[in-house]
Image (spheres, coloured by chain):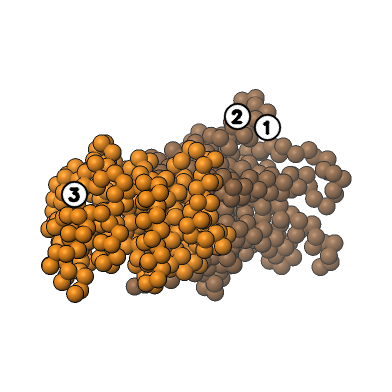
Chain colours: A brown, B orange
Amino acid sequence: MTAEALLPQVIAGLATGGIYASLALALVMIYQATHLVNFAQGEMAMFATYIAWALINAGLGYWPAFFLTVGIAFVLGVIIERIIIRPVENAPVLAVVVVFIGLLVILNSVAGWIFTYTIKSFPSPFPIEPLFGIRFMSPHQLGAIGVTLGVLALLYAFFRFTPLGLAMRAAAQNPESSRLVGIRVGWMLALGWGLAAAIGAVAGMMVAPIVYLDPNMMGGVLLYAFAAALLGGIDSPGGAVLGGLVVGVLENVLGAFVIGNELKLVVALVLIIGVLLVRPSGFFGRVHVSRV
Amino acid sequence: MLLEVKALHASYGPTRVLHGIDFGLDEGSITTLLGANGAGKTTTLRALCGMVKTSGEIRFAGKRVEGRQTEDIVRLGVAHVPDGRGTFANLSTEENLRLGAYTRRDKAAVQGDLERVYGYFPRLKERRRQQAGTLSGGEQQMLAVSRALMLRPKLLLLDEPSFGLAPLLVQELFSILRAINEKERVSMLLVEQNAAMALELADRAYLIETGRMVLSGAAADVKRDDSVRRAYLGY
């Protein structure tokens, strides 16, 4: 294996890794607020991507459809939290997990029912010709990396520099003290769901030109995102991003040179099991100690 | 009266903690609530903030507030320094303070208030960028008081602010509380184990025993009461 053969695989890995990173970040955001992994995150992204497809088919340009979809996904995320998640807020863990899985199945079936299970192609907004004269990377890969970085930068700025972002961080880590300074914690959770759904929508629209659009398109992607979030530490946003990139590169390089493309998904599964066995807190996760 | 409480009951699930207490607090005054562990002091403060289920009547600045959401009571100007300090451990000291002013719309004045609390507690200024969870217990207690002040409250509820502090720090904290009360006319309801210090600071005192008010009066009179002296002051 030469460096010349390796480089394109690494770069392709970074491109898909960025998409995994976005979805992993969405998982981490909901985990931080609820301490649960949202199994329906992938299907929410898939559904949003169908909405984008329908908007584009209805004659909207790609970018108007893109931003409209992000907005719709945000609103749907807030509605899901208010109507479906809120009533089980204080329910036992398993009950909530069952709700998440129910949500997954419902979104999957409704998408199949409305849009059929026929595989559709989804457009890329980026041109076919090489961007900026870069030949070792497809324009879509380059564009997806750019979009992902843009989303991450926006999120970072939002959480770091705005009062609302600060209030959301506070509500996630200390709900009682948050109420005592007047933060409406319930709404912060709903906003978190909205943001997670919006990020997922971006990830879905970026990955759909690669994996094609069908109701099961996010199954594999979500597994990689799980692996990424666990690798980075399930409660660390920065870790999720790094984990996503690492998983993307590993998946591509191992798939191309070691285990073959058919067994790529095994990389994610081995990582999930490996991290949980060896270092459950991941790269940057907090180790939780509780008094019993 | 700024705060008027009538026949306040409170319970955690089936366990009743307060059995109909009455008390009040004058505007600009410091009132202390004394009592043994488990008497219901913390619960009284939590009841005022809508953090436990209650029945009875709570009037704040003329408005009925019982049954309202905690977030809404805070917006009326009630700041709470909770039991256990309630630090946002993963946020910086300054972020903790900014959260205290979360409901305020006068953003320009918030910056000034930040400097003002740094003036009271210079140590916090030194540690403004530090993660609040890494502050010492005493510093976190100062942070909790400062965070509450950032609301510019009309009423400050203090739940054992002396807890875990070295005696010198307790004196310093209490003299700052007195200064805040005198200069800024912030009314305070102080729950304390350290009865001697609390009676020194307060204008009025109430004594609570197993969920019932058993004694009330001017702090100076309560201090002279024989039973209080034996049980809470220890001489």
Q: To which quarter of the image does residue A67 belong?
A: top right
The residue lying at 29 percent from left, 49 percent from top is: B29
Q: Is residue A142 visible?
A: yes
Pointer 1 indicates a residue of which chain?
A
Q: Nearer the viewer, mark 3 or mark 1?
A: 3
Pointer 3 indicates a residue of which chain?
B
- Which part of the image, by quadrant, shows the C terminus of chain A? bottom left
**According to the image, label 1 marks what residue?**
A62
Q: CA distance from mark 1 to mark 2?
A: 9 Å
Give the numbered dot on residue A55: 2
Horizontally, residue B97 falls left or right of residue A268, namely left
- How far across and down, in percent of the image, does residue A74 sit? 52, 38
Amino acid type, label 2: Leu
Amino acid type, label 3: Phe
Residues A10 and B12: in front is B12
Could you tell me which secondary element the residue under label 2 belongs to?
helix
Q: CA distance from mark 3 to mark 2?
A: 63 Å
- How far across and down, in percent of the image, does residue A237 sit? 57, 56
> Upstream in the sequence, badge 1 or badge 2?
2
Task: Check whether the beta carbons of the residues at disc 1 and disc 2 lie within 8 A of each other.
Answer: no
**According to the image, label 3 marks what residue?**
B23
- How far across and down, in percent of the image, does residue A201 sit? 58, 42
